[in-house]
Amino acid sequence: MQRALETIRNTWESFDPNQKILAVALGAMVLISFALYMSFASQHNYVTAFENLHVQDASKIRNTLRDMRIKYKLTHDGSRILVPDKDLDRIYVDLAEKDALPASGQLGFELFDQRAFGESDRHERVKFQRALSGHMSHIITASFDQVESANVWVVPAEKTAFLRDVEPARASVTLKLKRTGGGLSARQVDSIVNLMVYAVAGLNANQVAVLDQNMTMLNAIEDETTGSFRSNLEYQLVREAKLKRKIEDVLSGPMGQGNFDVAVNLEFAFDEITVEETE
């Protein structure tokens, strides 16, 4: 160490005045560049986590973020909360596992703050539905180590031919689980259901199916009034998910993966009963 310092001192003393000025200038430039790099590296890219929150819900979310030691920003009079993009998925899943997602507001979609000129309402809904499905697929895949990929399908609530009747929203989440990652716990499956219910307007937990790649139901769908298993709904959601995957497999070859959207809506006459008698 002493020898190194002696070498530096001798080198410095051998410089003429101009060389010393140049060396100091270069050293200062290196220090400034390093300081700027550290400053930019410490800055976070903030994205919208929740928007259109009521005052009480916004306050609860802020307290939760403080407990999680996550920085946040408030806009739109406190109704919109922004967080670092690296923390977004963890926030959603942690709140969903605790069943602490806010009662008001919705997930942030800054992509839809401005509407394209000449865009129809139907095109806007389709674009939003596609972005929502992709966003939820990303959150689920990034948040659970056991999940290799997730395919989210959403059917929004819509009016039937009879204006007083509304077809409820429903959704299915098909998970491709890793062979070595083990299965999802019941709590993790419930958190996926909670996320979907919060993200999709008018969606009830009993209208969400979570399946693995073998089309096995991972969540139990029960009737709210009787508590019995709703086999009809399970049958419908599983059949829709299977048919959707088959169509995607056929189209992915000629059209390319991700270049198309598939929506399947099956209707079954469950009220028809066939009775067979044998003697």
Image: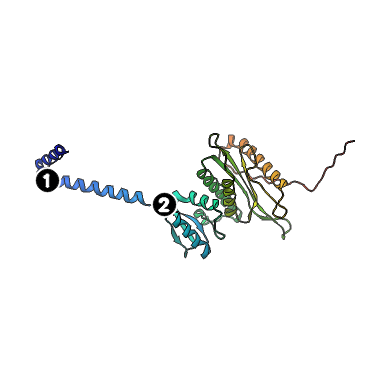
Give the image quarter of residue 240: top right
Q: In the figure, is residue 10 to the left or right of 26? A: left
Q: In the figure, is residue 29 to the left or right of 44? A: left
Q: Secondary structure at mark 2?
A: loop
Q: Which numbered dot is residue 45?
A: 2
Find the distance from the CA under tag 1 to the CA under tag 2. 43 Å
Q: In the figure, is residue 46 to the left or right of 250? A: left
Dot 1 amino acid type: Asn
Circle 1: is it few (<14), some (14-19), or many (20+) Cα within 10 Å?
Answer: few
Q: How many marks?
A: 2
Q: In the figure, is residue 23 to the left or right of 48? A: left
Horizontal and vertical percent position of residue 279: 90, 35
Circle 2: is it few (<14), some (14-19), or many (20+) Cα within 10 Å?
Answer: few
Q: Residue furthest right?
A: 279
Residue matched to label 1: 18
- Give 193 or 188, whichever is nearer the viewer: 188
- Give 121 or 227, whichever is nearer the viewer: 227
Horizontal and vertical percent position of residue 166: 69, 57
Horizontal and vertical percent position of residue 255: 58, 37
Horizontal and vertical percent position of residue 211: 62, 42
Q: Earlier in the sequence, mark 1 or mark 2?
A: 1
User: Residue at coordinates 51% horizontally, 59% vertically from top-left?
Assistant: 51
Give the image quarter of residue 1: top left
Dot 2 amino acid type: Asn
User: Residue at coordinates 72% horizontally, 45% vertically from top-left?
Assistant: 231
